Amino acid sequence: MTYVVLVPDSLEAKGLDVLRSSDGVEVNAPGKMNRDQTLAAVPAAHALIVRSDTKVDTELLDHAQNLRFVVRAGVGVDNIDLDECTRRRVVVMNAPDGNTISTAELTFALILSLARHIPAADASMRTGKWDRKKFMGTQLAGKTLGIIGFGRVGRAVAERAQAFGMTEVAYDPFVPERVARHLGLSIVPRLEDLFVEADIITLHALVTDDTRGLINAENIAKMKDGVRIINAARGKLINAADLAEALKSGKVAGAAIDVYDTEPPTPDNPLLGLPNVIYTPHLGASTVEAQEAVAEQAAQQIVNALFHDRFDNVRNRAVFDTL
Ligand code: MLT
């Protein structure tokens, strides 16, 4: 039997090579497909590899009579309706490993940009100015970095922070204390403890009912005056209106934001246009290395699932109760 693997988002060639070199796989990957093209192609597909653009929702699944596997080339599965996939016996997996270093490196690029006003200084010089006083920065050495979410990316950020001579505190209710001790930092039992200690807070958590809107007025009030906040995880971790207020009042000295509650952000997003915020358009995984790695991993997981009954990084484990 030949299995059709549909790739409606752009995927690095290394991933497509894995699929094309597998006997029994027919690859449908013409490049970025629009919604109508995807809906027209999905009835023939046994497996789907998506990035963040393709929405795997009820409408798409209604067209997908033969679909058995969906793999997200990357971490976040916000664009996939997991419950609906489970109901229809479609196994959803992600490919979480390849993005880690790139996202940690972007986090540090944002931390440094914020601490040293690099984007504003660059913009100023482009207007012909030479203004050294205006861009007085803050040193990272000796500062405390609060890491919320101590999974793959949080840990990679912690390792890099150590090289800058920072002290780190992490909060993650799912990670045992010994993991942090092994890396020479402490996991605090309560978020409040991190808020009190951190000069810079960086978010690396998933969006759940417990973490949605975690950066809100109540929690910001517990933070140090002049704290800086970095978000290269997910926009919904932040209550945008509350953070915007705190940025305007100076309670939060600055923020660097790579992710938004809707992407691209709508013009009424209160975080847009603030002078003490640095914006990037969801670039965490946007490196050649990360995209090649997630594409290869996603493709290999499809091959493993189709031919070896091996399922890695399943995001809807309840599906196995239905198979
Ligand atoms: C991810 O979820 O893998 C990252 O946020 C990057 C992306 O969405 O492509």
Image (cartoon, rainbow, N blue to C red):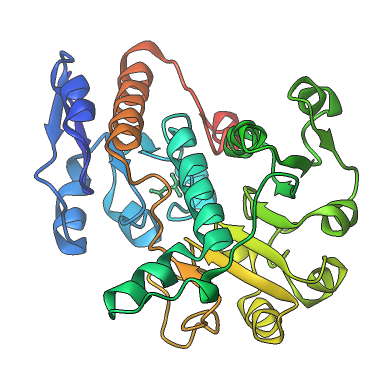
Q: Which of the two residues, 299 or 195, is positioned nearer the viewer here?
A: 195
Q: Position of residue 201 (x, y in %)?
A: 70, 56
Q: Position of residue 300 (x, y in %)?
A: 32, 21
Q: Could one spot residue 2 in this view of the protein? A: no
Report which quarter residue 192 is drawn in: bottom right
Q: Position of residue 22 (x, y in %)?
A: 18, 15
Decide if residue 129 is on the left or right side of residue 185: left
Image vertical order of residue 29 relative to residue 111, above or below: above
Image vertical order of residue 179 relative to residue 65, above or below: above
Which residue is drawn at the image coordinates 47% and 22% (left, top)?
A: 311
Q: Which of the two residues, 181 or 149, is positioned nearer the viewer here?
A: 181
Q: Could one spot residue 264 in this view of the protein? A: yes
Decide if residue 258 is on the left or right side of residue 291: right
Image vertical order of residue 200 relative to residue 251, above or below: above
Which residue is drawn at the image coordinates 30% and 26% (left, top)?
A: 296
Which residue is drawn at the image coordinates 22% and 40% (left, top)?
A: 11
Which residue is drawn at the image coordinates 64% and 59% (left, top)?
A: 138
Q: Which of the two residues, 300 or 273, is positioned nearer the viewer here?
A: 273
Decide if residue 141 is on the left or right side of residue 223: left
Q: Position of residue 198 (x, y in %)?
A: 79, 54
Tell me the quadrant of the picture where the N terminus can be found.
top left
Total labels: the figure holds 0
Residue farthest to the left, as pictured? 30
Image vertical order of residue 83 relative to residue 129, above or below: above
